[in-house]
Every structure is written in C-alpha cells, then in structure tokens.
Amino acid sequence: MRQWALVGIVLITCLVAMEGTVVSTAMPRTVAELGGSDHIALVFSAYLGALAIMGPVWGNLADRWGARPVYILCVVVFLIGSTWASMVHSMQELVLARFVQGLGGGGLTPLGQTVLSLIYERHERASAQAWLVSAFGLASLFGPPLGGWITQEFDWRWVFLLSLPFGGVGAVLLFFFLRPPALELRQVPFDWLGLGLFVVWMLAALQISPWMLPLGLLLWLYSRRLEHPFLPLPLLRFPVFGAVSGLAILLGAGLFGGVSFFPVFLQDFYKLNPVEAGRAMLPLMLGWVACSSQSARWALRFGYGRIVGLSALSLFGGYVALCLDSVVLGQIGLGMAGGLSFTPLTLSVQDAVPREQLGQATSSVVFLRTLGASLGTALMGAVLHSYGFAWMFRCGAALSLLGVLAFLPYRRAVSS
C-alpha cells in the first residue's frame, strides 16, 4: 500500500511541477488572445502569493485534522482552479483562477513531503525523496516543450487541463492507499486572529507596501504572547529552523524570480516561438533534474551544509553568467541551484523537530521558500517592466549574493 501511496504523491508532484513551467511558455500566446500584458507578473505572483499564504494554513490544519484528508482537499481545490483557468475570458479572471489554484497548491508540496516523512523511516526517506524530486525535475524538464507544443498546435487553454489526469488519479490513490501512522493531533485552539494578521501582512508584503514592516512587527509581537500561535515562532527554538528561515526566502526569491520570466525572455529577446523556447530551456531543466535526483542522497552522505552551500554558489554563478550573456551556463547554474537546495533544507528541518510538529515545520519551510518566490517574482517583474532583462538579471545576482551570505549561519547551525 505504501508504494501506491508514493505513486499518488509522485503524480501530484508532477502536477505542481508542470504547472509552473507549462504556464510560463503559454503566457505570450495567452496575452495575445486576452490582452492585458501588464497583468503577466500578476498571473505568477497571484499564484505564488496564494501558495505562500496557504502553506502554513494547510500545515496547521494537517497537525489538527491529519495529513491525509487535508492533502486530498488541497488537490481538489487546485483542480477547481485549473478548470476555471482553462475557461477564462480576460487576464483579470485568469489572475483570480490562478489565485484559486494557489490556494490548493499551497498544501501540495509541504504535505507531500510531510506524508513521506511519516510513512518512511529516516534511512528510507532519501530514496523516497529521490523519487519525489526526480518526478519534479522530469515534469519540469518536459513541461516547457510540452506546453509550447500544446500552445502552438492546439490552444493555450489545454495547458491548464493537463493537471486534471495527474491530480485525479493521484487523489484516488491517496484516498485508497495512504495510511499514515496515527499521531496525537493538536487539540489547542486555532489562532484565528493570528491567521487574520498573517494574511493582511502577506498581502502587504506581496505588494511591497510600506505597511509591510509595521504589520510584520505587530504580528511578531502578538504571536510572542501566545503559547500556540499561528505563526510558528516556537519552532525558532531549533537553531536549524531559524537559520533556514532567511536562507529559504532568499534562495526562493533569486531562483523563481528569474525562472518565471525565462520563457518570456527567450521568446522576446531571441524571437523564439513557444516550442523553440521550451527546447531552449533544456539546459536549465536538465541541470535541475540531474541534481534533484541525487540531492537527498548527497545531503545525507556529505552533509546538508555542503550541498546547500553549493546550491547558493550555483545560483549566484548562474546570474553572473546571464549578466555576461552566457545563456547556457546561466541556465545550468540556475538548474543546479533549484535541484540541490530545497530537499536538503527540508530534510535538515525535519530531522530537528519532533514528529508531531512535522506538518507545521515542513509547511513553514515551503512557505518561506514560496514567500521568497512571490517577493522575487514581484520585484524582478517590476524591474523587467521598468528597465528590461539586463537589469532583471542584475537584480537576481544581488538576491543570490545575499543568499550566499545567509548560508553562513545555516552552515554553523547544521554543523553544531
């Protein structure tokens, strides 16, 4: 039964991976039909923003209701958003549909990793994670050319319907075969006020509003007063979690901020059609697949710090190469960074916290990464709109350099 549950998680992982890369290649054709080119960044940031907002919510609910029903509910919400996105009539409506996708998608990655950590012991977890990240990488690899081919030969709307068979079959397998071990569920009251403050703060952060800092301070001060706040401040007593917080945000910002707009760069700067742009992204995706398939094993063999450090340096090197007009080397650097970084970060946190807090801890790591991706996409999209691709890559280099600096406290935490 455990193997079939793993197949279901892998299918849902493919769904999440393809959604990001396939949609990117379809955007130019979507804008040509619907208009509203100024909404391109919103199509990505609305999805990523909802992912970031809902990640901690789903993790919190999973610790209260159990991971299995919450995981399946996330799949259903995601498929509703995908179906709606395939039927929209304006860019504004597409932004709303992508937001609904993000509401469900916010729980798919963290809960998938949480379930794996529950049904597999630590010595088995590397192999199970290897299946997961390999599926993510392969789906990402085939996503751009597949999305470009569907967009060119059929219609961009079919791109959003790709998720239905993966999500549908995956949800059925989870329903019948996923049986995580029974854990003592959290019985503490839900912090509704903390959730409300968190959502308001997130909306301000995604808009890069001047209210972001005072709202964040208010949320922090409020959460410190509670024994069981919605904001997972108690996890900060684990040094690894505290070190991961800043690093995951910066790596997410630098990586996804650039990758989201890379198909647009290839089609706009090099005048490639969607299929050609998808093929041109193969160096990035091959680097991602090659590294992601081994990242968990390498992390357990060589240590979390070395692999995450290599990831941070690869991200910075990739952006330097892009600034020097070396597109292939730049893609390889970004692909290595994506493949090496996030699984070791998650595993290091999972090893540091008790099993009854795995849902909240794992979703918090994914939330921090997604928050960084949302902020990075908004920032780099604004730079692109105002100054062009050259300055967007320089912005990515600056973010990745900050990520290299943030790696230093993480290395100390995992080495202690």
Image (cartoon, rainbow, N blue to C red):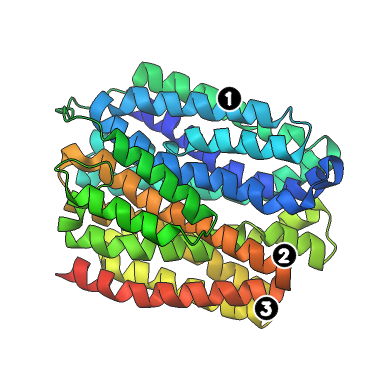
Marks 1 and 2: in contact by CB < 8 Å?
Answer: no
In which quadrant of the rendered view does residue 241 lie? bottom left
Label 2 belongs to which residue? 385
Label 1 belongs to which residue? 80
> In the current view of this chain or complex, which residue is farthest to the top?
176
Residue 244's place in the image compared with 325, above or below, is: above
Left or right of 152, for residue 91: left
- Residue at (56%, 34%) from the top-left corner? 101
Q: Position of residue 22 (x, y in %)?
A: 66, 45
Q: Amino acid at mark 1?
A: Ile
C-alpha separation, residue under disc 1 versus residue under disc 3: 40 Å
Q: Earlier in the sequence, mark 1 or mark 3?
A: 1
Number of residues whose C-alpha sits closer than 10 Å to that of mark 3, classed few (under 14), some (14–19) or many (20 or more): few
Q: Earlier in the sequence, mark 2 or mark 3?
A: 3
Q: Position of residue 318 (x, y in %)?
A: 56, 74
- Closer to the eye: label 2 or 3: 2
Label 3 belongs to which residue? 326
Q: Position of residue 60 (x, y in %)?
A: 29, 36
C-alpha separation, residue under disc 2 versus residue under disc 1: 31 Å
Residue 291 in view of the camera = no
The dot on residue 113 is none
C-alpha separation, residue under disc 2 versus residue under disc 3: 22 Å
* Quarter of the image with the C terminus in it: bottom left
Residue 373's place in the image compared with 323, above or below, is: above
Q: Earlier in the sequence, mark 2 or mark 1?
A: 1
Q: Amino acid at mark 3?
A: Ser
Left or right of 88, for residue 330: left
Q: Position of residue 345 (x, y in %)?
A: 32, 58
* Quarter of the image with the N terminus in it: top left
- Residue at (33%, 72%) from the top-left corner? 407
